[in-house]
């Protein structure tokens, strides 16, 4: 499948009083047509900021300091963040679903107003046509009695329903890419399953690609075809979903896979926790940021700067010096 | 619903005797909705509507369910933050469900709570050492200043914190460390029961395992300590608990051992809950059959008649909306509330 988005050497920084926070540091990734890509990491690893950078939604004190964002052959970095070119891409061609369905809808506007706004703005529909389309969209994402619910306000919807509205809005302009930033984290397990199935079905229908930003390894295992693992602002490992889970090559990935309880695990198993804390993103050392927590670290890790992503398998890259046999322990 | 059937629900066949530390029977907690000038009661939110279970000394008992199912309310009623509307709570041989407020002091030194959010559950103006030590002063557990200080240092070490950090304030700690402070505070009075209400869901993935392991280690160290582990994540609950109760809309639908719950789930809700949890292994997920529930959890203000789950149940029968199920023992230690069984 052809690549629709390619991000090269993206750096996004936040200037704070305490110093410069390198939220995303030299990250490169790509999204192909009609694929589901998982971006996995803990809070503060840069997974959300990298996606917000693609949308050019970084505001002061944040700043994209370098990099290219190639979307359909054009570099989005050449455009003003609030200029007309960027506005015609944002929401229309690259759409986003945010984590908090409680705060990402405007509480004083009806659901209908918020869905039709997108259609009127991007697709230049008239009010009546937009309303008809909004009903279709809400119907598609499984909101019962969509026609009457259109005049309700967000507080009259449950969390799961609000997130369905967000999905309907995001898909309303038939985007090439849908970025879902922790779309189900604040929802219940059974609602979570409903919503993820819905998103998968919808992007299939619209021939879009989906970027799933999440900390939940189970979710990416089920839905993603390719995965990027991020730690301390960098991509530490990437590859096909199956390779990452079966042949993880970065100690952080290995640690993540071993530290979550699995529903199918043997009783009495102890969890291998990752010791220590994620690093402070100000004044990061030049060598590997995972070094203080790494159980396999060798002398070379302490001396040399953090290596680049190196090919370790078929389309499988990792940023680590350590011999894989050392990690079998 | 026969009184007989109800009273035995969830109790284990072999139990009774000294080993049961907590025995909850037919617990109901309703929150009244008051309207109008005279604040007349117009309805009840039936947060917990008749739950029965018991806990043995040294056991880790998991309570799992989705938001609004009443799991937190059960925990809070046990520690008497809420007064039960109906039912009995026998803790260490004493019925505490109707104890007047003034007699609750001693009880609360034997039971403690660990909260979900380590950011809002610690007083930002109190130093960590004082937070951990305060329960001992409240319950007059220590006599001399030096004893107090030694005990606080001990508690810090127990939860893996450096006692030298006692003078720092909560904002100087990370989320995981704050949760450790919360755990140290819960341990301060040597409780026999700790109610852990979603203790890890606000933490990062790599930190969650540290806290789970800490809780397990502490329990292994203090053999008589029991936990009631309340959470929405069944994988986590299964990992830590010996027995698990699954709650749905104010009712316990299934109680059994963690192993049995995973191997032989009987209630349709338990099955759906298990299948909704993705397994972090793409090869398994590829071929896994899943039941995705339709609809959402109904409001506890207007619970459906009959079985509260019938509107979402994939195995619903016409009788499900008419008959409220009672809990039956389908195999030793395995109780299920479903009329189809």
Image (tube, coloured by chain):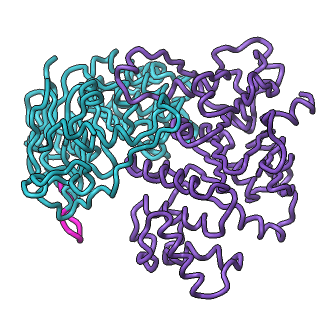
Residue B274 image position (x, y, % from top left):
55, 27
In-image side of A173 versus B183 (left or right): left
Q: How many numbered circles does the render carry? A: 0
The residue drawn where x is 76% and y is 15% is B340
A38 vs B145: above or below: above
Residue A202 image position (x, y, % from top left):
37, 20
Give the extent of the magenta segment. A13-20
In-image side of B24 versus A182 (left or right): right
Q: Indicate the quadrant where residue A32 lies.
A: top left
Q: Nearer the viewer, residue A319 or B157?
A: B157
Magenta stretch contains residue B20: no
Residue B236 image position (x, y, % from top left):
51, 40
The residue drawn where x is 72% and y is 47% is B74
Residue A175 visible from this viewpoint:
no
> Taken as a whole, is the magenta stretch helix, strand or loop?
strand
Magenta stretch contains residue A15: yes
In-image side of B235 versus B319 (left or right): left
Q: Which of B103 and A258 is in front in this view?
A: A258
B136 vs A293: above or below: below
The residue drawn where x is 26% and y is 29% is A37
Q: Nearer the viewer, residue A73 or A50?
A: A50
Q: Which of B107 and A99 is in front in this view?
A: B107
- Farthest residue to the top: give it: B318
The residue drawn where x is 23% and y is 66% is A16
Residue B83 visible from this viewpoint:
yes
Q: In which quarter of the image is the N terminus of chain B?
A: top right
In-image side of B66 versus A167 (left or right): right
Q: Chain A is drawn in which colour?
A: cyan
Residue B296 image position (x, y, % from top left):
60, 29
Q: In which quarter of the image is the C terminus of chain B?
A: top right
B146 vs B218: above or below: below
Q: Colour of chain B?
A: purple
């Amino acid at each position: 499948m052809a690549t629709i988005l390619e991000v090269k050497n993206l750096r996004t920084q936040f200037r704070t009083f305490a110093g410069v926070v390198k939220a995303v540091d030299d990250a490169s990734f790509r999204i192909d047509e009609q694929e589901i890509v998982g971006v996995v990491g803990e809070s503060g690893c840069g997974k959300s900021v990298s996606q917000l950078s693609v949308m050019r939604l970084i505001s002061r004190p944040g700043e994209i300091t370098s990099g290219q964002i190639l979307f359909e052959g054009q570099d989005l970095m050449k455009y003003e963040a609030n200029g007309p070119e960027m506005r015609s891409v944002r929401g229309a061609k690259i759409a986003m679903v945010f984590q908090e369905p409680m705060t990402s809808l405007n509480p004083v506007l009806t659901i209908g107003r918020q869905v039709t706004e997108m259609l009127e703005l991007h697709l230049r529909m008239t009010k009546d046509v937009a309303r008809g389309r909004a009903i279709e969209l809400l119907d598609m994402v499984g909101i019962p009695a969509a026609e009457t619910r259109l005049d309700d306000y967000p507080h009259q919807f449950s969390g799961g329903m609000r997130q369905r509205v967000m999905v309907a809005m995001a898909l309303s302009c038939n985007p090439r890419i849908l970025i879902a930033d922790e779309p189900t984290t604040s929802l219940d397990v059974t609602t979570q399953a409903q919503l993820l199935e819905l998103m998968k079905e919808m992007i299939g229908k619209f021939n879009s690609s989906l970027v799933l930003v999440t900390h939940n390894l189970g979710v990416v295992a089920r839905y993603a075809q390719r995965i990027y693992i991020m730690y301390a602002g960098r991509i530490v490992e990437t590859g096909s979903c199956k390779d990452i889970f079966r042949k993880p090559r970065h100690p952080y990935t290995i640690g993540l896979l071993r530290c979550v309880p699995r529903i199918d695990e043997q009783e009495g198993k102890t969890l291998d926790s990752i010791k220590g804390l994620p690093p402070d993103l100000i004044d990061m050392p030049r060598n590997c940021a995972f070094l203080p927590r790494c159980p396999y670290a060798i002398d070379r890790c302490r001396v040399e700067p953090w290596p680049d992503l190196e090919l370790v398998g078929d389309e499988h890259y990792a940023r680590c010096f350590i011999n894989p046999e050392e990690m079998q322990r | 619903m026969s009184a007989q059937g109800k009273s035995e629900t969830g109790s284990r066949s072999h139990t009774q005797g000294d080993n049961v530390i907590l025995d909850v029977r037919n617990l109901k907690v309703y929150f009244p909705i008051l309207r109008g000038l005279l604040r007349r009661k117009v309805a009840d939110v039936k947060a917990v509507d008749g739950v029965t279970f018991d806990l043995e000394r040294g056991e880790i008992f998991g309570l799992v369910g989705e938001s609004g199912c009443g799991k937190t309310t059960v925990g809070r009623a046990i520690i008497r933050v809420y007064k039960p509307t109906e039912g009995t709570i026998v803790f260490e041989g004493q019925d505490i469900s109707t104890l007047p407020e003034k007699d609750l002091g001693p009880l609360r030194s034997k039971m403690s709570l660990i909260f979900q959010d380590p950011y809002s559950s610690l007083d930002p103006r109190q130093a960590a050492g004082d937070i951990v030590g305060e329960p001992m002063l409240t319950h007059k557990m220590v006599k001399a200043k030096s004893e107090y200080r030694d005990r606080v240092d001990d508690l810090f070490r127990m939860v893996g914190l450096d006692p030298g950090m006692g003078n720092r304030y909560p904002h100087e700690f990370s989320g995981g460390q704050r949760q450790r402070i919360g755990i140290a505070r819960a341990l301060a009075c040597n409780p026999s029961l700790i109610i852990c209400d979603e203790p890890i869901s606000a933490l990062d993935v790599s930190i969650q395992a540290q806290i789970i392991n800490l809780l397990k280690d502490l329990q292994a160290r203090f053999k008589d300590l029991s936990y009631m582990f309340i959470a929405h994540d069944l994988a986590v609950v299964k990992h830590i608990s010996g027995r698990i109760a699954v709650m749905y809309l104010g009712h316990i639908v299934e109680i059994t051992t963690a192993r049995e719950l995973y191997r032989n789930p009987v209630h349709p809700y338990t099955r759906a809950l298990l299948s909704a949890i993705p397994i972090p292994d793409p090869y398994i997920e590829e071929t896994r059959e899943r039941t995705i529930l339709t609809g959402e959890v109904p409001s506890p203000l207007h619970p459906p008649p009959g079985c509260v789950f019938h509107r979402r149940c994939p195995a619903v029968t016409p009788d499900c909306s008419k008959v409220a199920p009672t809990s039956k023992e389908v195999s030793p230690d395995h109780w299920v509330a479903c009329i189809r069984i």
